[in-house]
Amino acid sequence: MQTLRCFNTEELLKVDGAVKLSEELVNNYFKMSSGQWLKNRYDIKTAKDLAFHECIDGPFAQVIKYEGRKKDVSLGSSSFSLYKVCLQDNAILTMVSKKKDLLLEPFLLYILTHELVHIVRFSKFKQRYENKDEAEVTLDEEHKVHCLTYMILKPISVPGLSKVFEFYKDWFVNSGSEI
């Protein structure tokens, strides 16, 4: 049985930095006020904090929608959507070790920006979360989100980001937004 790798302390610091930058960039791109941003309830977790069903084989991350409710409130009308970004440490670390020109920080920045774009689109009803099982809708949505991710990250200068764009280039070329 293969042992799955988790981010170490140094790598977790890189995750934290990528989270902060991706939040700022996505917030600025969608021109959301701080009040609007806080309404998009989400949490970002790494492998050590994921439940068994949140661990997947293949993708670098996934967004799972849960229903949240304030403590001591039993009415369904008080419920809200809570999105959980589940980073798949092992898949990310494996890819970075396999592709030597792919650096962890810019790769994390892309992945996190991508997942936050999904959350913004779900919360603004640009894409229904429930459509996730419809293959064609999902593929079309993935193309849109990759293109938006590229548009958000393109103006910034981060060492190694061009290699990440190269890694994802098929998502841009196939969508008509070639880089």
Image (spheres, rainbow, N blue to C red):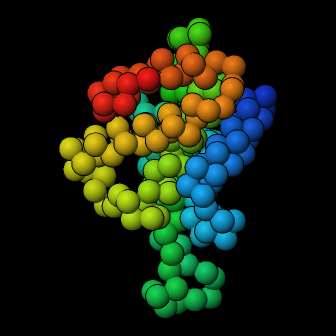
Q: Nearer the viewer, residue 36 or 75?
A: 36
Is residue 49 visible in this depiction of the protein?
Answer: no
Q: Nearer the viewer, residue 159 or 49?
A: 159
Name the residue at 70% across, 42% down: 21
Which residue is the extreme one toward the top? Answer: 100
Name the residue at 53% across, 11% down: 98
Quadrant containing the C terminus in the rendered view: top left
Q: Quadrant of residue 72?
A: bottom right
Name the residue at 61% across, 81% down: 70
Is residue 14 visible in this depiction of the protein?
Answer: yes
Left or right of residue 78: residue 23 = right
Residue 42 is situated, as x and y percent measured from the top left of the image, at 58, 59
Residue 45 is situated, as x and y percent measured from the top left of the image, at 62, 47
Left or right of residue 101: residue 140 = left
Residue 134 is situated, as x and y percent measured from the top left of the image, at 22, 50
Q: How many marks?
A: 0
Q: Nearer the viewer, residue 26 or 17?
A: 26
Left or right of residue 145: residue 29 = right
Relative to residue 77, is residue 84 depicted above or below? Answer: above
Relative to residue 163, is residue 3 depicted above or below? Answer: below
Residue 8 is situated, as x and y percent measured from the top left of the image, at 73, 29
Relative to residue 36, is residue 8 depicted above or below? Answer: above
Name the residue at 50% across, 80% down: 79
